[in-house]
Structures are given as C-alpha cells and as structure tokens.
Amino acid sequence: MTEILSRLGTNPMVQSFVSNLVVGEITLLTGLFWLIIAGIMSVIGGAIGGMLLAGKDLGYQLSAMMGSLLGPAGVIPVAAVGLVVLKLV
C-alpha cells in the first residue's frame, strides 16, 4: 500500500482518495467514483443485453444504442441509494 501511494506522488488529495478506496471507506469522492464505474458497466451491459434481446428484429446497432441508453436508467439510482445505505451502516 505504501509502495502504491509513494508512486502517486506527494499530492495529499490523491493519496487520501486511494487510501479511502483501498480501505473501503465511502466519502463523496469515492462514492462518485463508484457511481461512475456503475454507470459505465450499466452502459456496457445494456448494450450487450439490447443486442441479445432485439438484435435480429431491430438491427444490432440500434438495439445496442437503445440498450446502452436505457441500461443506466435503473442502475444509477439504485447504486446511489446503495452507496448512501452503505455509508450509514
């Protein structure tokens, strides 16, 4: 852990962020980081799901685009509520 932090430089903000990620503490920055990761994963999963469900009917590009737009609609609110619950517990 100290080896990773020493390679990041002497910026205390970056060291604090990485330290909080490693420990598992949820702060505002780490919560936003995990929310962005959840959003990216939901876009990828939505595109794959759209292609599997409606690829032959609508075309693979259109179904992937629709899936990637509609995938985060359910994931982002649930991830935000989950992070708040984890912070309070």
Image: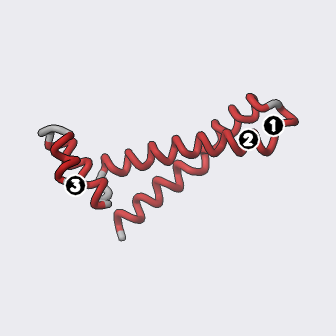
Reply above or below: 86 against 31. Answer: below
- Of the two numbered discs 3 and 2 on the same chain, state the one appearing first in sequence: 3
Q: Residue 17 at what x, y percent from top left?
A: 25, 47
In the image, is 65 to the left or to the right of 39?
right
In depth, the one of 36 and 23 nearer the eye is 23
Quadrant in which the C terminus is drawn: bottom left
Q: Residue 41 at what x, y percent from top left?
A: 54, 45
**Residue at mark 2 to residue at mark 1: CA–CA distance:** 7 Å
Q: Quadrant of residue 51?
A: top right
Pointer 1: what residue? 55
Query: Under tag 1, what secondary structure?
Result: helix
Total of numbered circles in the picture? 3
Pointer 2: what residue? 50
Identify the residue at image location x=53%, y=56%. 78
Identify the residue at image location x=77%, y=44%. 52
Identify the residue at image location x=75%, y=35%. 63
Residue flagged by tag 3: what amino acid is it?
Met
Label 3: few (<14), some (14–19) or many (≥20) C-alpha neighbours in 10 Å = few
Query: Under tag 3, what secondary structure?
Result: loop
- Of the two numbered discs 1 and 3 on the same chain, state the one appearing first in sequence: 3
Reply above or below: 74 against 54. Answer: below
Q: Could you say which disc has been placed on residue 1 in the image?
A: 3
Q: Residue 37 at what x, y percent from top left?
A: 46, 45
**Residue at mark 1 to residue at mark 3: CA–CA distance:** 45 Å
Residue flagged by tag 2: what amino acid is it?
Gly
- Camera-nearest label, 3 or 2: 3
Reply above or below: 46 against 79. Answer: above
Label 2: few (<14), some (14–19) or many (≥20) C-alpha neighbours in 10 Å = many
Q: Quadrant of residue 84?
A: bottom left
Query: Under tag 2, what secondary structure?
Result: helix
